[in-house]
């Protein structure tokens, strides 16, 4: 629940650990109760069948198995109820702690939020720089192809089959990824931190200013 700040609050860490442990033990206890209930019901049917068969054969009925299982079932039910009460008490202790230290916890969460936001922004900034360089390489390749196209190969082969494209042709399904969407997502992630990114064209503006001077 409070993984980002739990190490700063040992008491809360202990409370969370206690609640988690009791939740696990309570679940296991409930499963044991259900299993013993099923076994006791099966044992009752088996005991009755064996007793009836023994009496018809003139033999002494075997000792029934149901009473022992019912006793185990009752003990397991009591243990499960005790664990449920312990869990409710532990949850109450945790709720009181959260209420009493509400402002402190909110402050720590805000700090953790800022730290993680800065990490996301830093990673996104590096990714954006690489993405813009990739876009620039693509643009340079297109410009080179436009200005200095490769020589057309002489058509000496047999006619090729015609490819038919169904549906509309758009930049999304022909031109590759949507640049604006990719860049927009990264810039939004960058905004989560305090880091600033030099906008495209900023260096040109600076050079222009120097020339004008």
Image (cartoon, rainbow, N blue to C red):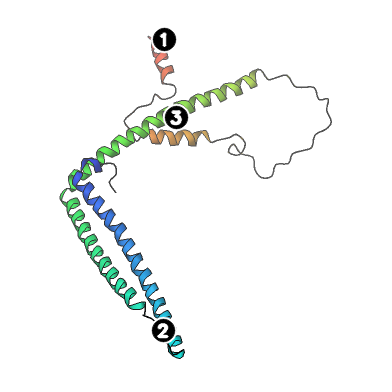
Q: Quadrant of residue 141?
A: top right
Q: Earlier in the sequence, mark 1 or mark 3?
A: 3
Which quarter of the rendering shows the C terminus?
top left
Q: x and y percent of residue 208 in the render?
A: 42, 14
User: Please, what secondary structure does the residue beneath circle 2 have?
Assistant: helix
**In this view, the mark in front (3 or 2):** 2
Above/below status of 72 relative to 16: below
Q: Earlier in the sequence, mark 2 or mark 1?
A: 2
Label at residue 127: 3
Residue plotted at (21% across, 40% down): 8
Label 2 with label 1: CB-CB less than 8 Å: no
Q: x and y percent of residue 190 in the render?
A: 38, 33
Say which residue label 1 marks.
211
Above/below status of 185 relative to 79: above
Q: Residues under labels 3 and 2: Cα distance?
A: 74 Å
Q: Quadrant of residue 187?
A: top left
Label at residue 48: 2
Assess disc 1: are there few (<14), some (14-19) or many (≥20) residues with their C-alpha within 10 Å of its C-alpha: few
Task: Please state which of residues 157 and 88 is positioned toward the viewer in this rendering.
Answer: 88
Residue plotted at (44% across, 24% down): 200
């Amino acid at each position: 629940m409070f993984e980002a700040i739990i190490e700063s609050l040992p008491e809360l860490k202990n409370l969370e650990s206690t609640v988690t442990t009791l939740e696990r033990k309570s679940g296991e206890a409930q499963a044991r109760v259900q299993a013993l209930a099923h076994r006791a019901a099966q044992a009752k049917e088996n005991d009755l069948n064996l007793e009836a068969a023994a009496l018809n054969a003139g033999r002494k009925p075997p000792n029934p198995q149901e009473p022992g299982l019912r006793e185990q079932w009752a003990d397991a039910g009591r243990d499960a109820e005790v664990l449920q009460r312990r869990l409710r008490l532990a949850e109450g202790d945790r709720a009181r702690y959260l209420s009493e230290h509400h402002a402190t916890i909110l402050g720590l969460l805000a700090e953790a939020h800022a730290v993680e936001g800065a990490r996301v922004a830093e990673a996104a900034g590096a990714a954006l720089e690489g993405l813009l360089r990739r876009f620039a390489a693509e643009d340079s390749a297109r410009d080179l192809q436009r200005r200095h196209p490769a020589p057309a190969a002489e058509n000496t082969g047999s006619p090729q089959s015609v490819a038919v494209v169904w549906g509309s042709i758009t930049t999304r399904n022909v031109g590759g990824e949507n640049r604006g969407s990719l860049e927009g997502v990264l810039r939004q992630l960058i905004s989560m931190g305090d880091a600033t990114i030099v906008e495209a064209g900023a260096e040109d503006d600076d050079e222009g200013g120097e020339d004008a001077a």
